[in-house]
């Protein structure tokens, strides 16, 4: 559910959140006035099979 929709995070008491976006999405949100506070990285750990 969206942040502003009934039953969304704001209804549950959230005041901040995290948004992950593609490079294109980041440009869109930047044009809408959002700002980057910290980059978001993803990692996958896959140990070698014994």
Image (spheres, rainbow, N blue to C red):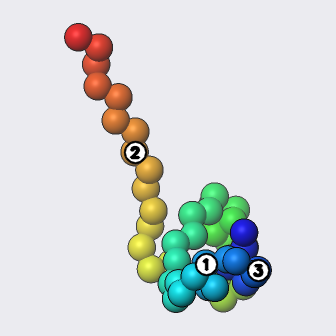
Instruction: First in sequence, mark 3 or 2: give its number.
Output: 3
Q: Is residue 35 visible?
A: no
Report the residue at 45% width, 62% height from top.
40
- Tag on residue 5? 3
Pick the residue in front: 44 or 8: 8
Is residue 40 shown above or below 45?
A: below
- Tag on residue 9? 1
Nearest to viewer (mark 3 / mark 2): 3
Residue carrying label 2: 43
Disc 1 crowd, CA 10 A, few/some/many (<14, 14-19, 20+):
some
Report the residue at 52% width, 72% height from top.
18
Q: Position of residue 16 (x, y in %)?
A: 51, 84
Q: Position of residue 5 (x, y in %)?
A: 76, 80
Distance in Å between CA atoms under marks 3 and 2:
31 Å
Horizontally, residue 36 falls left or right of residue 11, namely left
Report the residue at 28% width, 19% height from top.
48
Q: Position of residue 33 (x, y in %)?
A: 66, 88
Q: Quadrant of the C terminus?
A: top left
Distance in Å between CA atoms under marks 2 and 1:
26 Å
Instruction: First in sequence, mark 2 or 1: give its number.
Output: 1
Pick the residue in front: 13 or 48: 13
Distance in Å between CA atoms under marks 3 and 1:
8 Å
Instruction: Tell me if label 3 and label 1 are in contact, CB under 8 Å.
Output: no
Report the residue at 53% width, 84% height from top.
14
Q: Is residue 46 visible?
A: yes
Q: Quadrant of the N terminus?
A: bottom right
Instruction: Tell me if label 2 and label 1 are in contact, CB under 8 Å.
Output: no
Horizontally, residue 11 falls left or right of residue 49, namely right
Nearest to viewer (mark 2 / mark 1): 1
């Amino acid at each position: 559910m969206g942040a502003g929709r009934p039953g969304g995070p704001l209804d549950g008491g959230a005041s901040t959140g995290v948004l992950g976006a593609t490079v294109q999405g980041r440009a869109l949100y930047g044009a809408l006035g959002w700002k980057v506070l910290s980059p978001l990285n993803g990692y996958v750990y896959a140990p070698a099979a014994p």
